[in-house]
Image (spheres, grey):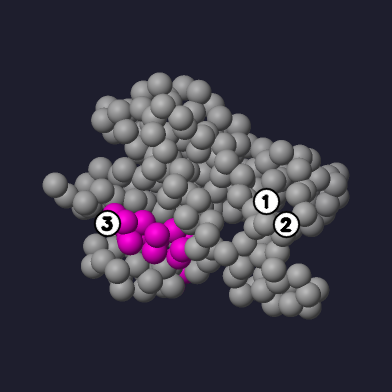
Amino acid sequence: MPQPVCAIIGAGEGLGKALATKFANNVFNLALVSRSQAGSAAALHAATTITPNVKFFQADAEKPETIEAALARVAAIMGEIHVLIYNCRGRFTACAPLDMTYDALTKNFNVEVIGALAAAKSVLPAMIKRSSGSVFFSSATAAYRGSNTHPVYSIGKFGIRALSQSLAKAYSTNGVHIVHVRLDCDLDVPVMRASYEKRSKSAYLASTEAVAEGYWLTHLQPKGAWSNEIELRPYGETWTY
């Protein structure tokens, strides 16, 4: 039998790289999707040290038609997608709610929600037909609360949670596991590590490898007991919700 395919949209040097490594180590072929191959260079290198069956596909999450086209190419070249991970994030720019611009809100909504919908539309019909498959939406605690300092980001995360819940309620009975992953933490990536070292709180950063393990274990859940929303945080994190 051919190896299953995992497509990761937003395969950057942090969590994207860890996810690519995790699924490659578990005998998946990898389709890595991002705006540029340079953006996925770390994930590509890490995955190809494990398996040769790794390919890059270009797409821009702000343009849903490019997501659809990229995932169509994945299916045509590599085969049907068994796991989809939508790991894109809109801009985390501070402003007061009344200072939000229409352009900033539109761009963020395109990345967080419309791009995620395009990805789901691309893979769910085949998953429903097979009665199997996993779809993960990477998210944050902002999906659970509004913000007086980062309202654009919060609105986008509210939207992706609503989309994930709606898809799960509609298609879980067809055998497709759809999961909203709330990351209630900062990830241990270079830019955050530098920030935390200044604050002497590096123990509170979440290992990207440990977070990727959480995705993998959720993928393995039997149909009789699925989690459709999970939260992940390091043990030292001060809970923010």
**Residue at image coords 54%, 27%:** 166
Judge whether residue 219 is colored magenta. no
Q: What residue type is labelled 1?
A: Asp
* Residue at image mark 3: 27
**Residue at image coords 47%, 49%:** 215
Q: Eyeballing the image, is 170 above or below 127?
A: above
**Residue at image coords 73%, 57%:** 237
| Bounds of the magenta segment | 16-39
Whether residue 91 is visible to the viewer of this picture, yes or no, is: no
Q: From this viewpoint, which residue is outermost toward the front?
A: 235
Q: Residues within 10 Å of mark 3 (few under 14, many from 20)?
A: some
Q: What element carries label 2?
A: loop
* Residue at image mark 2: 237
Q: Position of residue 91 (x, y in %)?
A: 66, 56
Q: Position of residue 239 (x, y in %)?
A: 76, 49
Dot 2 or dot 3, earlier in sequence: 3
Q: Is mark 1 on a helix, strand or loop?
A: loop
Which mark is drawn over residue 184? 1
Q: Look at the image and tell me in which quarter the C terminus lies.
A: top right
**Nearer the observer, 86 or 118:** 86
Q: Eyeballing the image, is 177 above or below 218?
A: above
Q: Position of residue 196 (x, y in %)?
A: 74, 72
**Residue at image coords 56%, 30%:** 165
